[in-house]
Image: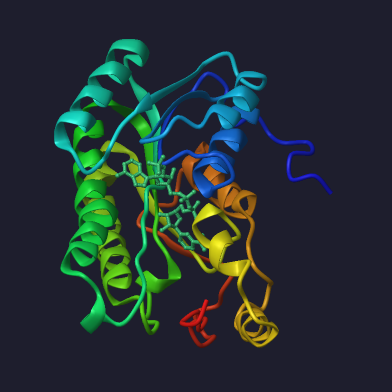
Amino acid sequence: MSPHQDLPRRFTGKHALIFGASHGGIGGATAERLAREGALLWLASRREPSRLLKRLRRLTDRVCWHACDVGRRDSLETLIETVHRDADHLDTLVNNVGIEARGPLEAMPPEDVARQLDVNLRAAIELTQLALPLLKSPGSITHVGSILGLGGCQGFAAYSASKAGLTGFVQSLAIELAPQKIRVNLVAPALVFSPMTAKHIGKWSLKTERKILASHPLGMGMPHDVAAAIAFLASDEARWITGAVLPLGWLPQYPLPDIADL
Ligand SMILES: NC(=O)c1ccc[n+]([C@@H]2O[C@H](COP(=O)([O-])OP(=O)(O)OC[C@H]3O[C@@H](n4cnc5c(N)ncnc54)[C@H](OP(=O)(O)O)[C@@H]3O)[C@@H](O)[C@H]2O)c1
């Protein structure tokens, strides 16, 4: 069955800003899902996702992409000013930006540690802070964390730390913004087939594949599986949900998927 059959139209006329929307990834699938449900889109990433934009322009009246490096405050400020000028307000903010570097901490260049914390955590806080004045009440913010932010895995110490920090940020900010009816939630996906993971998956041995699949009882996720959860949390259907950390493709009772040799 197509993931797009008989979709509701929960975002008709709503303004959505998605950070980290690229072709083939979770952000791209989220943009497509929201567009199919009627949203007007503002997208940001460093590289222009031309194929994705072409696809989206067939689905929605309004899709604008702006180059933005979330690691640079001036770049974020320019983006927010542009969105403010074009859209006046936002109904929903999705932050899907993430990078990963893997390997034993002892051997990891300090720049790789710093970059993951900077892009996955510090910038996530900064972009949320800058976008807040544009968010209408009721509104929603959804961050993309990871199951590696809920537990540990060999080779991912700095990445896990960045995503665990993001989880704590969401839980505290949800309390702060609840009186303004702005909801803040996080999805925490297990392994998803995306540009971030495809290059590794292509090199898996049969043994590795078996091991990974054994720790993913529902199988590996696709970007549209995550997009469906984000769309739900961002929509008014979730008007009574805030501060939620939603694991996807994994059960908290299960051992954390071992993706060390991914
Ligand atoms: N794939 C998985 O198995 C998995 C599992 C759990 C969680 N996640 C999380 O899911 C999110 C999406 O990942 P994905 O798998 O869909 O891979 P992806 O396509 O590589 O998504 C990462 C996005 O972040 C953007 N980005 C990276 N650095 C940026 C920067 N400095 N400024 C602005 N944008 C930046 C990328 O675009 P540009 O490079 O063009 O800037 C891209 O749009 C990430 O937060 C990741 O940590 C992924």
Residue 89 is left or right of residue 51, and the answer is left
Q: Residue at x 60, y 52 (%)?
A: 223
User: Is 172 placed above or below 84 here?
Assistant: below
User: Which x, y percent locates residue 229?
Assistant: 56, 52
Residue 241 is left or right of residue 124, and the answer is right
User: Is 246 placed above or below 250 here?
Assistant: above
User: Which x, y percent locates residue 207?
Assistant: 66, 88
Q: Residue at x 50, y 84 (%)?
A: 258
Depth order, front residue of 43/233: 43
> Which image quarter: residue 7?
top right
Q: Residue at x 60, y 83 (%)?
A: 215
Colour pattern: rainbow
Q: Is residue 192 visible?
A: yes
Residue 60 is left or right of residue 1, and the answer is left
Depth order, front residue of 142/46: 46
User: Which x, y percent locates residue 39?
Assistant: 54, 25
User: Which x, y percent locates residue 127?
Assistant: 24, 39
Q: Residue at x 19, y 27 (%)?
A: 77
Query: What is the tally of numbered marks visible in this picture?
Result: 0
User: Is 206 placed above or below 177 here?
Assistant: below
Q: Is residue 237 visible?
A: no
User: Is 214 placed above or below 121 here?
Assistant: below
